[in-house]
Amino acid sequence: MDLMRRSSVLVVDDSPDNLKLIGGLLKDLYRVKIATDGEKALAIARGPSTPDLILLDVMMPGMSGYDVCRLLKSDPLTQNVPIIFLTALSSDQDESEGLEIGGADYVTKPVNPRVLLARVKTQIENKASSDFIRNQNDFLDAEVQRRTLELTAIQDVTILSMASLAETRDSDTGNHILRTQYYVRALAEALRQHPRFRDYLTHDGIDMLFKSAPLHDIGKVGIPDHILLKPGRLTIEEFEIMKTHTTLGRDALQGAENSLGTQVGFLEIAKEIAYCHQEKWDGSGYPQGLSGDDIPISARLMAVADVYDALISRRVYKEGMTHEEAIAIITDSAGTHFDPDIVEAFLSIDDEFRRIALRYTDSDEDLDKKRDKLEQIPSQNGK
């Protein structure tokens, strides 16, 4: 009974006698509101306290009850409020029309008090049940969204932590990580509608690529400093050791995934990129010598981004090339080093690559730190 007393009923009728009669029947069980026409009914229903039920006359001056019902059902604020038509119209056609436009019930005048109270009680209870289910669903939806955001945040923190680990080994990787991340996303967006790539480069797929790209060189944490930071050309033996960063990266990410005990989308892509971004279109790359479409799309995208950035970037042992020089080299390498369609996409957005490079440029301070670090590294023989 306490629940019923908290429920409110809006009675809409142009007859003061009908309002007095219906109000008298309901007042001991519900909070009763009244309106003498459709406009007032809409104002009350859309007000700060939406009623739990509306008893609605059909024949009123101005706006009819059917018109009021249509407007209430088209408004998200009031569309879930049950409506009982209370009218002298008693034909099957009238009742059918009322139910078809959204009425929950149809009661003809003169009313039987016991019947009316029973039908009001039924609709109030139905609405309470519906509201409970709706609130539960809203809570579950909110909880799913919260957990999704939480998992996304965990992914982002994991990636940033692992990428930062690589950065501690090689100060070159800081802005390189940012630049290549945005290069890959720009390339992916440019290829989004391409027949060869559109099934892979969905919105979610591109988002995963963007998240995973910073981990492409994570394996370099396992390369000795005297090789990783050597200011010059590597010997054949040193280069063979350097090449293992692809396998080291893949294995490290696989180990992280094994610890979780389940496959993780962004780690799957990160493993592809880490392991295969040094493969070449003609099969002359490493570590597996893959060629053509056998190279994962993620790795093919990273290959262009990685090489472009290496070409334009200053290092302690070299000056960076111009944007135009880098474009020429990548263009000449289409079909040998790079997927030709990805190179074509790169050429169509090369200005975007230039803007990304300028946005995340390496500073002179970064270069000085790199020089200082190199001076602290002993040679391989300890001299």
Image (tube, rainbow, N blue to C red):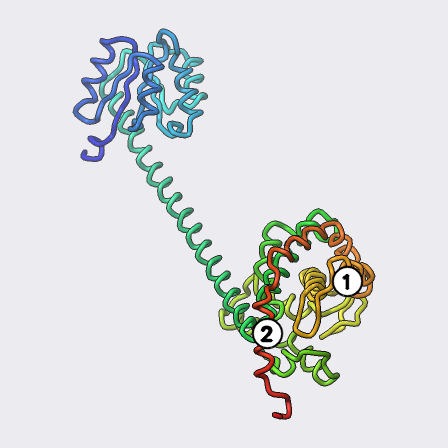
Image side of residue 181 versus residue 138, left or right = right
- At label 2, counting other C-alpha atoms closer than 10 Å, the crowd grade (few under 14, some 14-19, many 20 or more) is some
Q: Quadrant of residue 302?
A: bottom right
Mark sitting on residue 153 = none
Mark 1 and mark 2 lie on one chain; the one further toward the N terminus is 1
- At label 1, counting other C-alpha atoms closer than 10 Å, the crowd grade (few under 14, some 14-19, many 20 or more) is many
**Circle 2 is placed at which residue position?**
370
Residue 202 in view: yes
Name the element at disc 1: loop
Give above or below for 17 relative to 383: above
Which residue occupies the foreground of this view, 353 or 276? Answer: 353
Give above or below for 236 relative to 331: below
Q: Quadrant of residue 239?
A: bottom right
Residue 142 image offset from top left, x and y in percent? 40, 47
The three-letter amino acid code for the residue at tag 2 is Lys
Q: Quadrant of residue 237?
A: bottom right
Name the element at disc 2: helix
- Mark 1 vs mark 2, foreground winner is 2
Residue 113 image offset from top left, x and y in percent? 22, 18
Residue drawn at the location 33% of the way across and 14% of the way down = 57
Residue 191 in view: no
**Circle 1 is placed at which residue position?**
338
